[in-house]
Amino acid sequence: MRRPCKTGLLRRATSSYQAGNLDEVQKLYERILKAEPRNAEAKRLLSVTHFHLGLSRLATDRDAGIKTLESAIALQPTFSDARFASCIAELAPRLRR
């Protein structure tokens, strides 16, 4: 069986995200990271997905998102999008109080 290319998976993940299917989005980013564990962008996008799942479900998803962001930053320390998202993820629970 032929594996879909990363670009195809990213497009599917984007479409699923826009449709609000976060569980599918998470699976797609995890597939990308299984093939490319050092893909910092996929880690950042997965962390955003975890964060959104955490808002709607459990804090553990938000915590997983923060850990994934930290991993993306470790791979690419100058990754400003990941650094910004990490700050937002840390602050969001405090803002809802």
Image (cartoon, rainbow, N blue to C red):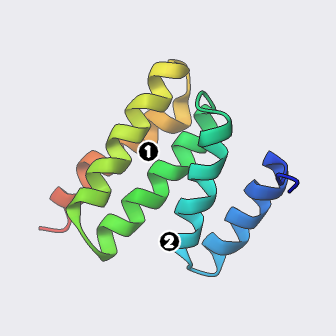
Q: Toward the viewer: 92 or 44?
A: 44
Q: Secondary structure at mark 2?
A: helix
Give residue 95's position: percent from left, percent from top: 20, 61
Residue carrying label 2: 23
Q: Which of the image's four quarters has the N terminus?
A: bottom right
Q: In which image quadrant can residue 10 be found?
A: bottom right
Neighbour class for label 2 at 10 Å: few (<14), some, many (≥20)? few
The type of residue carrying mark 1 is Ala
Q: Toward the viewer: 37 or 82?
A: 37
Residue sitting at x 75%, y 66%: 12
82 lies left or right of 86? right
Residue carrying label 1: 85
The type of residue carrying mark 2 is Asp
46 lies left or right of 94? right
> Do the CB atoms of the residues marked 2 and 1 lie less than 8 Å apart?
no
Q: Earlier in the sequence, mark 2 or mark 1?
A: 2
- Residue lying farthest to the bottom in this orientation: 19
